[in-house]
């Protein structure tokens, strides 16, 4: 099983100017669904969301692909 939290953290840290401010919290986990909350510095929020949410959608797509290999569903909530 992949370490979803680590993968999400690496993706977010690569996108932002202040990687030390990236926080990934495991909010909920059951048999088939894992929910994460991603927090970044206020100045970096636009970099993680992107124009019209394209970067956020791409992050969620990558996480979905990683989780699919394990038969799980990953939800990423960006705050």
Image (cartoon, helix red, strand yellow):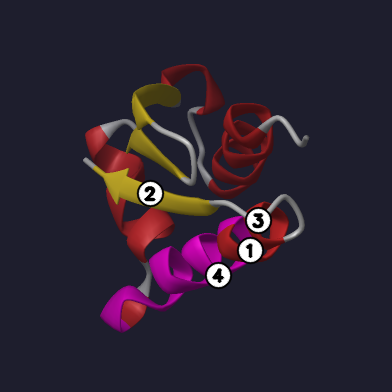
Q: Which residues are magenta?
A: 52-63
Q: Tell me the CA gap for discs 4 and 3.
A: 15 Å
Label 3: element kind: loop
Q: Which mark is residue 28?
A: none
Residue at disc 2, secondary structure = strand
Position of residue 12 measured from the top left corner of the image (x, y, whole percent): 54, 42
Q: Nearer the viewer, residue 36 or 46?
A: 36
Name the residue carrying label 2. Answer: 76
Q: Quadrant of residue 57?
A: bottom left
Q: CA distance from mark 2 to mark 3?
A: 17 Å
Q: Which mark is residue 61?
A: 4
Residue 68 in the image: x percent, y percent? 67, 62
Q: Looking at the image, which residue is at 76% across and 36% down?
A: 2
Nearer to us: label 4 or label 3: 3
Which is nearer the N-term, disc 3 or disc 1?
Answer: 1
- Counting residues from the start of the chain, the first of labels 2 and 4 encountered is 4
Q: Main secondary structure of the magenta part?
A: helix
User: Real-space Cα distance between discs 3 and 1?
Assistant: 14 Å
Marking on residue 71: 3
Residue 17 against residue 6 in the figure, above or below? below
Query: Is the Cβ of the residue at disc 1 closer than 8 Å to that at disc 2?
Result: no
Query: Residue 29, position in %: x, y?
Result: 40, 30
Residue lying at 31% horizontally and 31% vertically, measured from the top left: 41
Could you tell me which secondary element the residue under label 1 belongs to? helix
């Amino acid at each position: 099983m992949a370490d979803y939290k680590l993968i999400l953290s690496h993706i977010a840290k690569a996108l932002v100017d202040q990687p030390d401010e990236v926080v990934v919290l495991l909010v909920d986990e059951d048999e088939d669904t894992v929910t994460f909350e991603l927090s970044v510095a206020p100045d970096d929020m636009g970099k993680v969301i992107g124009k019209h949410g394209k970067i956020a959608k791409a992050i969620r797509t990558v996480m979905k692909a990683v989780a699919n290999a394990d038969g799980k569903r990953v939800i990423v909530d960006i705050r």
